Image: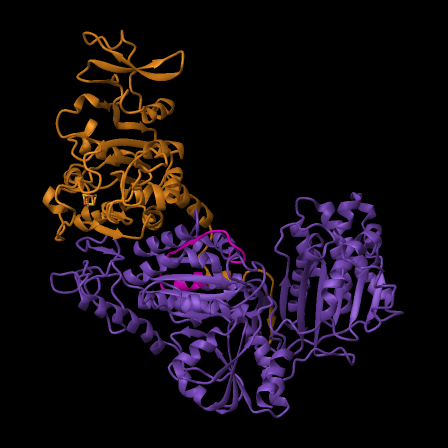
Chain colours: A orange, B purple
Amino acid sequence: MNEMTKIETTLKDWESDQEVRWCPGCGDYAILKAVQRTLPQIGADPANTVFVSGIGCSSRFPYYIESYGFHTIHGRAPAFATGIKLANPELDVWLVTGDGDGMSIGGNHTMHLLRRNLNCQIMLFNNEIYGLTKGQYSPTSRVGTTSPSTPMGSVDRPLSPCAFALGVNARFVARAFDVSKNLPEVLKAAHAHKGAAFVEIFQNCIVYNKDVFNDFAAPKGAEDQQLWLEDGQPMVFAKGARGIALDLDTLSLKVVDVVDGDWQGAGVLVHNVTNRAIAHMLVEMPFGPFPMALGVLYDDPRPTFEESVLEQNARAAEGKELDLARLLAKGQTWTVEG
Amino acid sequence: MASVAEDRPADSMMEGSTPEAVVVRFAGDSGDGMQLTGGQFTLSTALAGNDLATFPDFPAEIRAPQGTLFGVSAFQINFGSTAIETAGDAPDVLVAMNPAALKTNLAALKPGGLIIADTGEFNRRNLDKAKYDASPLEDGSLAKWDVLAFDISALTVEAVKPFGLGNKEALRCKNMWTLGLALWMFDRPRDPIYNWLRGKFAKSPELADANIAALDAGHAYGETAELAGPLKKLHIDPVESEPGLYRTITGAEAVSLGLVAGAQLARLPMFFGGYPITPASAILHNLVKMKEFGVTTFQAEDEIAAICSAIGASYAGQLGVTSSSGPGIALKGEAMGLAIMTELPLVIVNSQRGGPSTGLPTKTEQSDLYQAVFGRNGDAPMPVIAARSPADAFECAVEACRIATQYMTPVMLLTDGYIGNAAEPWKVPDPADFAPFPVSFLQEKNHGDQLLPFARDEKGARPWVKPGTPGLMHRIGGIEKNPGTGNIDYSPEAHQTMTEARRDKVLGVANSIPDQEVCLGEASGRMAVVGWGSTFGPIHQAVRRARRRGVDVAHIHIRHIWPLPKNLGELLKGYDHVLVPEMNTGQLKTVLRDQYLVDAKPLNKVSGQPFTIAEIEAAIEGALA
Ligand code: SF4
């Protein structure tokens, strides 16, 4: 997020003149709309906003937003964003990446951007597949995913982007899915966080990995499998009938029934966005026995990378005069007389 | 190279009492501090007004086992009263701090040269490590040379006794004792070294005092030893130099200063993204100390992130710079393509080293010319400049910044490990002598009510549009684009037009660079010896010597490797023979043949050591025989 002058815009102002070229029905459309809806709500200024992306279906995103946009190379968007922010910290930078771009070829850069805490929003569209290259399995694909490169099913175990983010010391981790009506709220929270804000967005690739998130993200009927987390609120789901509690014997989470709304009696935890240990447990909950944890899982700001760098720059320059001739003549010199 | 006395001989010679130039090599264990000794001797030599060139040659290992052959670290300096352009072919004096140092460096020593050896280190253990059966100091095998062997170790321990150091610490002062002797030999003042030692050991004055005592003891030893034996005091007159202020400079320092000056001339803050790699890291280390000039440095997670962050900074309106050596440059290739495609300014410094792969990290080579000119996917043209010496690297860096910002293109600046580490006197330039090339960012739409981010000026350059500028929102990327709007455009016409536009823009840089000059000899004749990069020195001296013997030969040195100067083809056609000495297997040679259909003949050396003058002289003779 940036401390910025709020600008009045409408959703239309954020639509570029470029024809959107995702497959019809792709979850990316819903995310694009959610972002275009969010930007006016946070008072973002198109001239001061930069969308940076790598390569992949998701990385086409910047072309469709009427702001500054840089479609870079595969996996490296975090590195470009770092240069952009260090050169001009006033810019409001959004990163758009995917599970292949951000977790495979660019995993290294995602890691370092998060641990450095560069002040920007990272939206990782997780569709558990390589879409643009026609459907190979990705680092988030579930074991057994059949694809052109794994006809007998994939054998390597997937990673969880949110667990990765927490592991490399991200200070803001959130999760949502493409068609969720809550997505703008999550994006707003990400924008309000000063520092690297990591948002995993489950996205339906209807061509190569159709409906793999339907158990919790179907447009209708899967709500009972969604645990929407809110700071200070009890961790209840399934219309308040169930909740998440801490099993003190195993120091792990468990699902409990909530009878007559008495979540306290059931020992349901209250969500505290600064509790890192619980955040780790929430992202590790196996889906099926547990619901999918969504919303802001963790939010505990620290000084940002660019602030610290620029503060050092200023300190190094303090009291020094900008004299190039003096710099060139530094060290031991001698004069040859004419 | 500081001299204006271009046409006087600079051959090393010890005969006579006042030679014009002397080559000294300090060699010892990597723990003996030979690079420091060499560096301080260089400084005192520069202060005495001699022209000089140095060649630090150190092992790849950080701490090689003591006394071993591969742990030898050497520092060679050639200094004199005339123009010096190489570190010298063969040393006149070899200081060998142990048997391994003697063994690995003896072959280079000039017949009749002087060996100064520390007998304290010529014990059985060290002789074994150096694979000597018998001590060479005693078996007569050094008869070709003058030998001055005495127990420097014991003399040093004795000299620093009053300071109560442990034996190990006391022995560490050996290099200062040796330096003291060298200072005496060449009639150099000790004051600058005293000052340096006091600064270096400000926190432990007893160490400063001990080192000074060792230095003085070495100096005093010279006085007494002169009475007998081969040790002679030599005085080298100052070189005749252009009047002005001088300092010594290494290539890495010159590149750093040149980049800062270039950014200032462009009126831009500079962003440097780097990743540790030998021998390029020195540039990062230098730039972190220049933050007051609007320099932001960023140590990235890898080579790719280093260049990508620099491109990001350029996109946001600063001058992005990245630097590396061959292997790192290879990793940056894809990102260079993006900078070419999005037409953003960027300076990429390649401190070349021996390759391929990890190759010879601490040895020099100029084998990345193909990589610089051709080494990317697609038709990806990029200007390439090569520095010829530490001092020249300053101007080259400024030039790289100029081309990058004026033509909206990445530019590669080639140096090498030799240029980066070597030092030479440098006439400190006046920044006011450089014409500024201020950058202007596009502030409003450039085509009626339309923004055309890829409209071109008369140089073929597109406008630089900074994010944050109201009303100029647009998208750029690595996909082929419409020649004006920059929107994605895969059409056949768009790719044809844009590929040609990128090529023509880079070729057009030739309009802004000086015509190729002949730096020694006539503009036509029997032979031109054509070089680039750090082979300048030996080529220049070899051509000079051949000309003195009446050979019709000229020296042409190319700074702009791509695009080449416009008149170069015509110029080369004026010679019967074209000889191209390179520390690779013939890369510039290939480019010259391709561009001009000239019968350029290669002379190649890839041993990790610079050419000697004699090698090039022999090749000239051979080709004309
Ligand atoms: S391939 Fe999948 S992710 Fe890509 S645009 Fe089509 S539906 Fe969307």
Residue B474 visible: yes
Instruction: Name the image quarter holding residue A1.
Output: top left
Q: Position of residue A285 (x, y in %)?
A: 32, 23
Report ligand 1 position as a quadrant: top left
Quarter-of-image position of residue B534 = bottom right
Q: Is residue B67 left or right of residue A62?
A: right
| Relative image position of residue B117 (x, y in whole percent) | 80, 62
Seen at 65% across and 51% down, the residue is: B200
Please provide the residue range marked out in magenta. B259-280
Position of residue A106 measured from the top left corner of the image (x, y, whole percent): 35, 45
The residue positioned 12% from the left and 53% from the top of the image is A17
- Residue A173: % across, % down: 31, 32
**Count of numbered circles in the view:** 0
Nearest the camera: B434 or B130?
A: B130
Q: Residue furthest right?
A: B228
Q: Is residue B241 above or below residue B58?
A: below
Quadrant, the N terminus of chain B:
bottom right
Q: Is residue A94 magenta?
A: no
Nearer to us in this view, B606 or A172 = B606
